Image: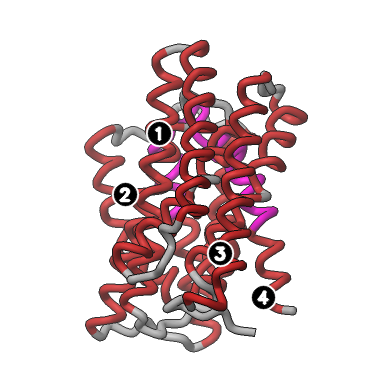
Amino acid sequence: MRIALAYISVILLWATTPLAIKWSGEGSGFLFGVTGRMVIGAACILFVMGIKGQRLAWHRKAGLTYLAVAVQIYGSMLAVYWAAQFIPSGWISVIFGLTPLLTALLAAMWLGERSLKAGKLLSYVLGSSGLAIMFGSALQLGHNAVLGIIGVLTAALLQSTSAVWIKRIDAKVPALSQVGGGLTVAIPPYLLTWAIMDGHWPAVVSPLNLIAIIYLGVIATTIGFVLYYYLLTRLAATRVALITMVSPVLALIIGNAINNEPLTLKVIAGTFLILIALITHEFVDRSSAGKSGSIIKEEA
């Protein structure tokens, strides 16, 4: 039951996060938005750890785990915030829907999982087709929209790399410590990046800006990341990535309803193909699970 509740919570958080990311960077700048979020998130995480009397472990495997988490917290998140300037928020979640495919590909190469059979390859073709349609729609919005898609793809690849790397290290570090350690490693690069690329306190921070940053720091980072890594320690990396099969549809609806983001036929068609690719990928996963066996087992 706890795993199911955590799974649903992460879906809802991931569906609302793209729009909050877009709002947090408007006016104040994306670097201020993402750095502010992570600083707030780190303060919250370390506060919770202090209340629980939990300390960060710094043995070799723990340190490697924090570095792997920082790949997602710094690399992936920075790419997403940059890309959010150029594309509708709902697109972020849709393109991130390719994460399970990227995760399975990396797991096959890095963890030795058997995830490249004919059915899996079909899901990659469908996912690529959906992405191609999204690129076509981006061309209508201009060159920057294409850059935005490339940015989100880069972020998805970095998140998949982080997830598989964590599973490979297998340090048995608690979820809260993973996030706390990852943020501890990621905060200095964030501050350095902001100082070099911007370095100025924004002249105006609107109420919407501030609410979005606080929401992302307190809720999406503190609660969302902990739940994500909680699931990652108990489920196969590809299973956790399948959260992105539901969140894209919700994100598109939220973006359209709240932020008046367009829902064109190309966007709908691209989203549909990506979702079909994920369903195909999941169906093959389940049908072959008993035969091949995954290195990473799903706990009850």
Q: Is residue 34 magenta?
A: yes
Q: Is residue 114 left or right of residue 186?
A: right
Residue at x-position 71% and y-position 22%: 260
Marks 4, 2: nearer the viewer: 4
In primary-sequence order, the first of circles 1 and 2 is 1
Marks 2, 3: nearer the viewer: 3
Q: Which label was assigned to residue 190?
A: 2
Q: Which residue is mark 3?
A: 285
Residue at x-position 47% and y-position 23%: 135
Q: Nearer the viewer, residue 255 or 160?
A: 160
Q: Which residues are magenta?
A: 11-38
In primary-sequence order, the first of circles 2 and 3 is 2
Q: Can see residue 176? A: no
Marks 4, 3: nearer the viewer: 3
- The residue type indicated by label 4 comes to Ile
- Separation (CA) of disc 1 from disc 2: 13 Å
How far across and how far down the image is residue 125, in percent? Answer: 47, 39
> For mark 4, does the 10 Å Cα neighbourhood hold few (<14), some (14 to 19), or many (20 or more) residues?
some
Q: Nearer the viewer, residue 292 or 42?
A: 292
Q: Is residue 284 above or below residue 298?
A: above
Marks 1, 2: nearer the viewer: 1
- Separation (CA) of disc 1 from disc 3: 33 Å
Q: Is the Cβ of the residue at disc 4 closer than 8 Å to that at disc 3? A: no
In primary-sequence order, the first of circles 4 and 3 is 4
Marks 1, 3: nearer the viewer: 3
Q: Which residue is mark 1?
A: 82
